[in-house]
Amino acid sequence: MADQFDVVVIGGGPGGYNAAIRAGQLGLKSACIDKRGQFGGTCLNVGCIPSKALLYTSELYEEAREKLPKLGIKTSAELDLAGMMAHKTKVVGELTKGVEFLLKKNRSEAIVGEARIASPGKVEVKLKDGSPRTLETKHIVIATGSDVAPLLGVSINEERIVSSTGALSLKDVPKRLLVVGAGYIGLELGSVWRRLGSEVTVVEFLDRITPGLDGEIAKQFQRILSRQGMRFQLSTKVTGVQKKGDSMSVTLEPAAGGAQSTIETDIVLVAIGRIPYTECLGLAEVGVQLDSKRRVITDAHFRTNVEGIRAIGDCREGAMLAHKAEDEAVACIENIAGRAGHVNYDAIPAVVYTHPEVASVGKTEEELKAAGVEYKIGKFPFTANARAKTIAATEGFAKVLADAKNDRVLGVHIMGAEAGNLIQEAAFAIEMRAASEDIARTSHAHPTLTEAVRQAAMGVEGWTMQM
Ligand code: FAD
Ligand code: NAI
C-alpha cells in the first residue's frame, strides 16, 4: 500500500521546504521531495547563498586593496580563489544540511528523488537508486522553482559560456568576462569577477539597467558601477557566440536592428532571466493549466484548476525571489489547514547585493505615474549621513514615496551601504499601512545608516533636518 500524507511538496527550495516545515508545525503529515540530492533548492545550492558568499569575500578583497589604504591601514592582500570557493562551499553545505535538520525536526519526510504527479492525490517518485515509490496525499504543492532562460543561438556549456551556476564556480579569474543581461545576476556576479580582476562588459537589450527598479536609482547605479570599472553596452542584443582561437567572439546587434559588430571575450555569462521549471511533472496529463510563460496558473489561494493541487514560488507568477516563495509557502499551507494565510505583494522587498546595494519595496515613481496616483517625494543622500561618512560609504540616497492625499508610504527605494538591511523598515511600514510621518517621527539611533531613511521620510513634508 502507498504511503499516506496530508501534504506532499514537490521541490525542496525556499518555497518547498518552508511549506513542509509549516505543515509540520500545523500538525499535517508531510513529505518534501527534491531531485537535486541536497535540499535548499536553487537559492541555497546555486543562487542566493553561494552568490552572497562570493559577493562578501570579493568585496573584502577589493576593500583590502582599494579602501583600507585610504583609511590608514596598510595591507598586502593576495587572492586565494580556491580558498574563497571553499568558504562558499562550506556555507552552502552547512545551510543545506540545516534544511534537512529542520524538515526532520518538523516531522516532514525528506525524500531525494524525481517526482511526477500521477493523478490528483497521487505522486510517483523515482528514488535516487532508481526504485519507484508511490505517495498518496490529500494535497499536492508544486514548488519546482525555475531554471536559466536560454539565449537563442547561444548554448550554455558551463565552461566558456556559463549561466549563473557556472559563474559561481569558475576555476580562474577570467581576463575578460562578457555578461548578457544587466539584471540581478549580471550585476551581482559581474561585480564579483570585476572585483577579482576581470574586465567586465555588460550587454543589455534595453536602454537601462535593472528594469523594474526605480528609474532614477537605476541611472545613478549605472554611473557608480561604471566608475567601478564595469562597462555597459545598452540597447544591444547578443546574436551569437563563436569560439575563435583561445577567445570567444560575441556577435552584437543594436536592439532596434542595424549593423552587427563583434567583441572578444574569455567567458560569456548568460543572465537574461529565469523561466519556471514545470517540466517532467506530468502537469499536462493531469490537466494543470500553465500560462504562456510556462507558469502554473493559480488563484489567490495558490490553487490550480485541478482540485487538491497548488503551486508556490518561482513556478507561479510574481517576483522570482526566495522570500516571496517562503511567504507563499506559509500562506499556502495555512490555507490548506483552514487558516487565513495571505501574502501582501506590495510589501515584498527586492535587493541587488552589489556595492552599493540597491533595495526597493512598493511602487516606483514610474508605476505611480502610470497609475495616475498623486504622490510626494522625500530624498536624502548618504553624503549627509554621519555614519556613512564614518565608514567611508557615502554613495547613494534614500527615497520615500508617499500618497499625496493621506501620506501612506507607497514605495521606498534605497541605494547605499546596507540598503538590503535598511529596506526592512520600509517593508514593515508598508505592511502596517504606515504614513511617511510615522517613519519620520520614529526615533532612529544615532549614528546609523537608518537615519538616512528617516531623513528621507521627513523630506516628504519638507522638514529634512540634516541637509
Ligand atoms: P527553487 O529554489 O528553484 O527550488 C525548486 C526545487 O525543486 C529544486 O531544488 C529542484 O531540484 C526541485 N525540483 C524541480 N522539479 C522536481 C521534480 N519533478 N521532482 C523533485 N524535485 C524537483 N532570491 C532572493 O530572494 N535573494 C537572492 O539573493 C537571490 N539570489 C539569487 C542568485 C542566483 C544566482 C539565482 C539563480 C537566484 C537567486 N535568487 C535570489 C532567486 C531564488 O533562488 C529563487 O527565487 C528561489 O530559489 C525560488 O524558490 P523555489 O522554492 O520556488 O524554487
Ligand atoms: P533579470 O530579469 O533580473 O535580468 C535580466 C536582464 O536581461 C534584463 O535587464 C533584461 O532586459 C535583459 N535581457 C533579456 N534578454 C536579453 C537579451 N537577449 N540580450 C541582452 N539582455 C537581455 O534576470 P537575471 O539577472 O537572470 O536573474 C533571474 C532572476 O533571479 C531575477 O529576476 C531575480 O528574480 C532572481 N535573482 C535575485 C537576486 C536577488 O534577489 N539579489 C540575485 C540573482 C537573481
Image: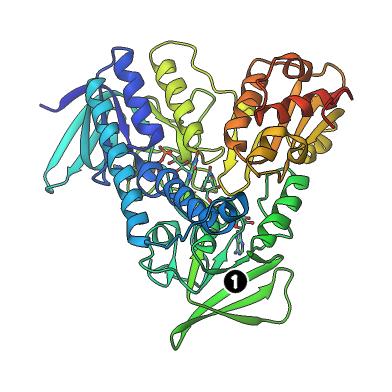
Q: x, y (%) of residue 108?
A: 24, 24
Q: Amino acid at mark 1?
A: Val
The residue shown at (63%, 24%) is 425
Q: x, y (%) of residue 402?
A: 80, 25
The residue shown at (28%, 12%) is 27
Quadrant where the image shows the C terminus: top right
Residue 303 seen = no
Q: x, y (%) of residue 179?
A: 55, 65
Which quadrant contains ligand 1? top left
Q: Secondary structure at mark 1?
A: strand
Residue 458 seen = yes
The residue shown at (45%, 57%) is 164
**Left or right of 195: which side holds 16?**
left
How many numbered tags mark residues here? 1
Of the pair 87 and 63, the residue shown nearer to us:
63
Of the pair 9 and 234, the residue shown nearer to us:
234
The residue shown at (32%, 15%) is 25
- Answer yes or no: disc 1 within 8 Å of ligand 2: yes
Of the pair 270 and 315, the residue shown nearer to us:
270
From the image, tell me which residue sits under label 1.
238
Q: Is residue 208 above or below residue 231?
A: above
**Left or right of 20: which side holds 201?**
right
Quadrant where the image shows the N terminus: top left
- How many other residues sit within 10 Å of disc 1, few (<14), some (14-19) or many (≥20)? many
**Left or right of 113: which side holds 215?**
right
Q: Is residue 135 above or below residue 178?
A: above
Of the pair 83 and 220, the residue shown nearer to us:
83
Q: x, y (%) of residue 410?
A: 74, 26
